[in-house]
Amino acid sequence: MSVMGAQFQIPRVRPGRAGKTPVAIWDLLVWAFQSERVSLDFDELASAAGERPGVSMEWVMMQRANLGCAIDGGGRSEPHPDADLVASAVSCLPEGCGGRRMAIWIADLARQGRTPDWGQGVSPSCQPVAWRQCKYGRYAEREIWTGPGRWPTPQLGKSDGYACRVVFSGLASERAARRREWLAWWGALLELQTTFEIRCDLTGFVVTREMPPRSPWKKEA
């Protein structure tokens, strides 16, 4: 999956003290992974409390609340407890939403403050496979063509019989693949948003229904 995309500044997200701060799910993820620097631990409860892995996000969050402490490897100042809960929820994404592979991708994007590249920079292109440099400048590399359609050797002049191999990029299939990745990422964010709506154990935040656009490419039409 590509990690290229729009870059965001660190959102000015702060957990509320007197009350809970409204926050969009993506801003919450960026805050947790970029500002608080939490890490994913797919077997955190199994290693800390002897519980079995592979359970739902809601179960993990309930067990963490029962433990009454943050599970952290140490070696640095502990992140905010809400950031730990966010990391737990991401770690427990169901397979229908991409599972661990999606969790790692979301965490990586959030640390960089980037959304996925849905193909906004993809345009059709045809380039030579290789270039060569001479005193007059750069030129496309060519080779003697021995494939179908080659003229008989006696009919070829000194500069005849050459071909330049090219490679095509920015095809419709590439753009479609990136759009599918965006939709998978968006669906995983919706799953996380729903999780925090159903069981909101966050002490300083309340997750709103604000989401990134589902199909940003439709603006191009």
Image (spheres, rainbow, N blue to C red):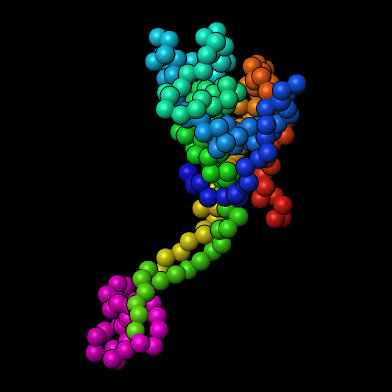
Q: Position of residue 44 (x, y in %)?
A: 44, 19
As displayed, is residue 159 above or below residue 8? below
Residue 127 at least partly seen: yes
Q: Position of residue 215 (x, y in %)?
A: 67, 44
**Quadrant for the C terminus in the image:** bottom right
Q: Position of residue 151 (x, y in %)?
A: 30, 83
Q: Main secondary structure of the magenta part?
A: loop
Residue 80: quarter of image: top right
The residue lying toward the viewer, choosing from 86 and 1, is 86
| Residue 185 included in the magenta stretch of the image | no
| Residue 156 included in the magenta stretch of the image | yes
The residue lying toward the viewer, choosing from 182 and 110, is 110
The residue lying toward the viewer, choosing from 167 and 114, is 114
Residue under the image location 32 percent in, 89 percent down: 159
Q: Specify the segment rendered in magenta.
A: 135-163
* Left or right: 26, with 106 as reference point: right
- Most extreme residue toward the bottom is 157
Residue under the image location 32 percent in, 72 percent down: 148
Residue under the image location 30 percent in, 77 percent down: 143
As displayed, is residue 59 above or below residue 161? above
Q: Position of residue 175 (x, y in %)?
A: 55, 52
As displayed, is residue 146 above or below residue 89? below
